[in-house]
Amino acid sequence: MPHWNPVPFAQQLLDLFAALLLLIVFAMLSQRRILTLIHLFALQGMILALSIADSAWLTHQPHLYYSAALTLGLKGVILPGLLRRLIGRLGVVWDVETLINIPTTMLLGIVLVIFAFNLALPIAHFSHTILRNTLGIALASVLLSFMMMITRNKAVPQVIGFLAMENGLFFAATSATYGMPMVVELGVALDVLVGMFIFGIFFFQIRDTFDSLDTRKMDHLGRD
Amino acid sequence: MDIWLMLSIPVLGGLWQGWRGQHPEAPWVNVLVSALTLLAAGNLLLEVARHGVVCTVDEQFRLDALSAFLVGLTAFVGLTTAWYSRSYLLHECEQGRMDGPRLRLYHGMYQAFMFTLLLALSTNNLGLLWVAMEAATLTTVLLVSLYRTPASLEAAWKYFILCGVGIAQALFGTILLYFAAEKRLGEGGTALLWSHLIQVSHQLEPTIVSLAFVFLLVGYGTKVGLVPLHHWLPDAHAEGPTPISAVLSGLLLNVALYAILRTKVLVDGALPHSFAGPLMMGFGVVSMLVAAWMLRQQHDIKRFFAYSSIEHMGLLTFAFGMGGLVASLAGLLHMTLHSLTKSAIFFAVGQVAQRWKTHDMTRIQGILRACPRLGWGLLLGALAIVGFPPFGVFTSEFLILTTALREHPWAVSPIVLALGVAFAAIFGQVQSLTLGEAAGVENQATRPSMVPWFWHLVVVLLLGIYLPPWLLQAYRQAAHLLN
């Protein structure tokens, strides 16, 4: 009779959160409406925070609770709030155009997920943490967010893709390790926040100069 | 304690500038703050020379021969650029291209940028190094779009997005490195400290470390401007104010390369075979060839010299990729000389562009006639950058080439080809800019300031003729840390 080792509940929960994160990135890839995109981003931040809190519980790492609180505040509340106010003030509620049609994007996304899992396989093998199956998902979310940045041509969705990529990286940090040292996490959070403000300034500058937030209009450099 | 002093001076200076940066005394305060930073850096250099290593706050901050030399270089070019931007900004204000808020932004961000560079160099924590590198992008991105022209906004957006995505790869690499390290050093604060990592580097898991290095090389390589990740660099250099082009080329690229070098040493320790070296050599040679080729097609004078920076960064990446004491020493020497020469060239180019009111090289002629000082500055700077003896760049390029000839002969012909094409392009272009009848000068009002570029070129010339033994010793110590 084989030895049956039940997977602890917290571990199952973590796998669930990981799967949800991947699902959300796919939902973002297929989403055309910008407000829904921001809501999905907020949801992603909240689930990320939950998953960090869960791994804190699982691994008894108190500093991960602070990290979860930081993530919830910054990525679940502050950044989506800032983005919503921004698009409110910019007056943009357009539907997002994509450069490649959505079914093709989804298929490409699946290819990327397979690639990410293959890439993560040799590393996850070395993982002695109980969080090993999640690294592939983290890498997949990074790559999918990257693809979202490439396939969108409006400035705001590109920035959301950028922030989603950052979420994927944070998930990688908690799933592969027990989270980065606190000072590094604080530094990264500060950079993201400052970056968001600069993005906001940029949106206005770009709109005032180009009369649009379409980054395809910005392709004149290097053509002389 | 001294590290704190050095880091706090630009922070306080930046805060003051954010408050009163539009006032007439602000440019002088900028110079003063930079001078104080240089003094504090000099004090640290002496301390490193005496003790070998300076640490503080549980080794979170640490200066050794390698980082100390770069701190000195950064603080020096920071001061001369602050001096130069004084006359540059005065002129821009007269032309109505600058106003109060922009001046405040410029001065505040200039000091913030210096702070991020010094933080990146003096931290021992690879995570903080990442934070500082990202912050360096954030502080300069609004400066690139300072003039609010469509072209400058496009350049800044490109810079922001490309470097942001690039540096995200570096964060993933850092996470992987931490993942490999915490098995040996335990979780918590010390597993990202370089000085701890280097002691256990031979025990790190090779698979993870090599994957981490690929991500780190791509990430920080974007900021170094390695081909094919270089697309932001010429635009950001061309569209921002010229003092910012000078510090981007002269300082930011160096610090990004420094980040790669720090991780390369770890990878070399972890892997039995050479892995990082060949990768860097490949990137370096390709960057040189592509940049030399692109040089020939440029019309914008600042883009032109930006491509020259990519070429030199390629040569440096190649030299450090070769490894070995001689190549590393030559690389460090070349890093110094390139910073000084390229910023000197940008100082001259900025004044030329202000006088001719264009960046288009086909419309600039006869600089020597119209303005002999600037003409000589540009001519001598160009001679120095293409590696004409007796300028120091000749020495370092010669050392790199002879080492390559001995150890990696395959690389010599592409490098010589790239250097040759770049030589022809720069020499030909500068000849047509400086010689001949003066044409197209729009503005002759102010006397050109020659202080910063003149001293930079004097140092480059002196280092080509005579390398003092104490300096050679310092370079040797720094090169030793890379092997």
Image: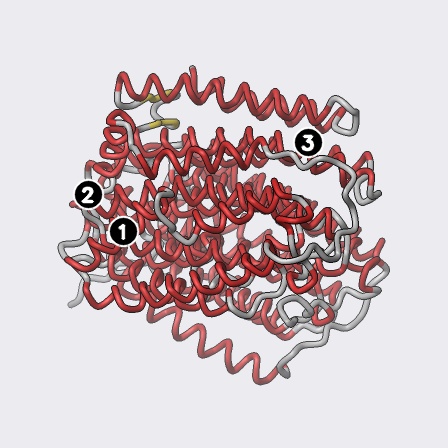
Q: Amino acid at mark 2?
A: Leu
Chain of the residue on which disc 2 is drawn: B
Q: CA distance from mark 2 to mark 3?
A: 40 Å
Could you tell me which residue is drawn at 34 percent across and 59 percent down? B214
Tag in front: 1 or 2: 1
Residue occupying the point 49% across, 43% down: B250
- Write down the residue under mark 2: B325
Q: Residues within 10 Å of mark 2 (few under 14, many from 20)?
A: some
What sort of colour scheme is used for the picture? secondary structure
Alpha-carbon span between mark 1 and mark 2: 15 Å
Name the amino acid, label 1. Answer: Phe
| Helix, strand or loop at mark 3 | helix
| Disc 3 crowd, CA 10 A, few/some/many (<14, 14-19, 20+) | some
The amino acid sitting under disc 3 is: Arg
The residue tagged with tag 2: helix, strand or loop? helix
Quarter of the image that includes the C terminus of chain A: bottom right
Q: Nearer the viewer, residue B332 or A129?
A: B332
Residue B313: % across, % down: 41, 53
Please state the horizontal and vertical placement of residue B276, each as a whole percent of the image: 26, 56
Say which residue label 1 marks: B398
Q: Is residue B136 left or right of residue B211?
A: right
Mark 3 or 1, closer to the camera: 1
**Residue B86 tag number:** 3
Mark positioned earlier in the residue sequence (3 or 1): 3
Of callouts 2 and 3, the N-terminal one: 3
For mark 3, name the chain. B
Query: Relative to B317, is A143 above or below?
Result: below
Q: Position of residue B440 (x, y in %)?
A: 75, 57
**Can residue A72 be seen by looking at this rendering?**
no
Q: Give x and y (percent) for residue B457.
A: 47, 38
